[in-house]
Amino acid sequence: MKSFYKAAPASIKQQASGTCMKNFLLVICFLFISVETFGQQFSQYNTGTLYDSFENPAQAAFIPDTSNKIAFNLFIPNFNSNLYLTGNAQVPLKNRVFDGRYINTGLTIEEGRFNRANANANIYSIMFKVFSSLDGNQEIGFATQTRGEGRGLVTDETLLLLAGSQNFERDDYSNIFNSNYTYQSYHQISASYREKISKSFAFGVKLSALLGIQYQQLQIDRSHITFDRANDAAIITLQGRNRNNYLPGGFSKHDLIPSFKNPGASISIGTIFKTRDNYNIQFNVKDVGFIHWSAQSNVGEFNTTRTAPAISSNRREDNLYGSVYDIVHSADVEKAFTSPTNGKIELSANRSFWLDYEKRFKYSPTAVLQKEIFYDGYTAALVNPVQYNNLVGTLTTSYNNYGIFSAGLQFMVKSPNIEFYIGSDRVMQSVSLLRAARKSNSQINKNAGFTGADFYLGFSIKFGDMIEHPLNASHVPLGDRPGFLKRMWNSVFHKD
């Protein structure tokens, strides 16, 4: 095998100093995930909040004769964020991140074990919606948000190498570092329209302009390592593909400012059908879109060998990072490319039940099925809200095709014109990770089915005139013209 040593560039050496050891570990093991989350929080389904109406376009945000006609979040961010990590890497990673030491408990060699990480984020900075007409219950909205989407697979051996070569008995190994990750973040500016076309059918659409912030993708298809123990070095060969819209060290806060450098678009379409026995069947095709990353981006197919020196020293992470960086970017060329957003298809069924004769307690369960369009992920969830007057408590459970079972709690205060909610769809895991971050040895060394965290928070108010039907109006109504979709519906079915 042909090999030679090439030192990492100066900019990389600078980046690999100080806090780089922890950052490098997070980059490799959490796959460039920062404050992201996995998809939508299911607990908001059929709550009728402003957040719910933007995430599920056919959902109504207003109730005629009850609420006011303008809804706004007052620029208070409404967000949800979570992540999860599965596999043998949970205990070693928590020890390295929270305790600053290596414990290789459970990591294997040549058993084909992978560690899966998944994360995304959804932060609404502006949500504004107006009830525009009683005839058709028309709602028009505008929103700005920032999203992130990340996922990846990393082998046990990749993590084991960070502790040095002493854990590897042989000098040569093949295909033990075949890992991959994808991460992208972007701003989203949206306009939404919702209309109740008939008593039993509602339709909504959300059209969005996307402004790309950051994209990184790495796919390692083949790998080989030879340990040169006499010189305390590792000769590493990697073959695969790399795409990114900036080089590490070149990203700054300025890049967070929205621009048209990386444009894109997406669409969400939703429908709600109410059956004769009062079931609400909701179907959504959500966030289907693309981002075109500029011609200043980098694309490469690499097949290169580099030597990482001093892999038993306290600078082994820096040295490994410099060598891997050289390999991954060895064939980079400036080229534009297009990436999809994480579109989803969702189907849900909901029905409400009064639990007492005075109609103070209401139970409104929702069953949800979700399938990712461009990936293999799918999830089933059951949302169980119980409402007493304006107070709502929700228990949400979900299970996905990666074998992850989650249980969460939500507390919400929802009056006709004010709504506030806070919760987590992974309560136990969030508490465990928080305790681990606070140096709890029992939680750091806990090897559960998965390690994860989840938190969400939201607020909005409604103001302006109350939405009133003519017979209940406190002022003389000017009349409402049927909405565009309802006029089409009436023309097709010859209704007046």
Image (spheres, rainbow, N blue to C red):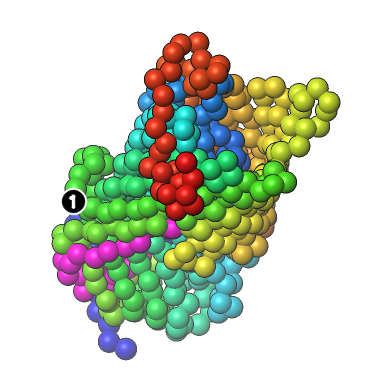
Whole-percent x, y for residue 2 in the image:
27, 87
Whole-percent x, y for residue 202 in the image:
51, 44
Q: Amino acid at mark 1?
A: Lys
Q: Is residue 274 visible?
A: yes
Whole-percent x, y for residue 254 in the image:
21, 40
Is-magenta flag for residue 263? Answer: no
Q: Is residue 103 visible?
A: no
**124 w.r.t. 340: above or below:** above
Report helix, strand or loop for mark 1: loop
Q: Nearer the viewer, residue 123 or 47?
A: 47
Task: Give the position of the N terminus as an image quadrant.
Answer: bottom left
Provide the residue designation for mark 1.
261
- Label 1: how many Cα within 10 Å (few below 14, some 14–19, many 20+): some
| Residue at horizontal 76 percent and vertical 24 percent from the top | 360
Q: Nearer the viewer, residue 206 or 91?
A: 206
Q: Nearer the viewer, residue 180 or 491?
A: 491
| Residue at horizontal 55 percent and vertical 21 percent from the top | 65
In this picture, residue 212 sits left or right of residue 412? left
Residue that lies at the very extreme toward the right in this rendered image: 357
Q: Which residues are magenta?
A: 319-343
| Residue at horizontal 74 percent and vertical 31 percent from the top | 362
Is-magenta flag for residue 333? Answer: yes
Q: Nearer the viewer, residue 221 or 58?
A: 58
**25 w.r.t. 272: above or below:** below
- Place residue 103 in its image quadrant: bottom right
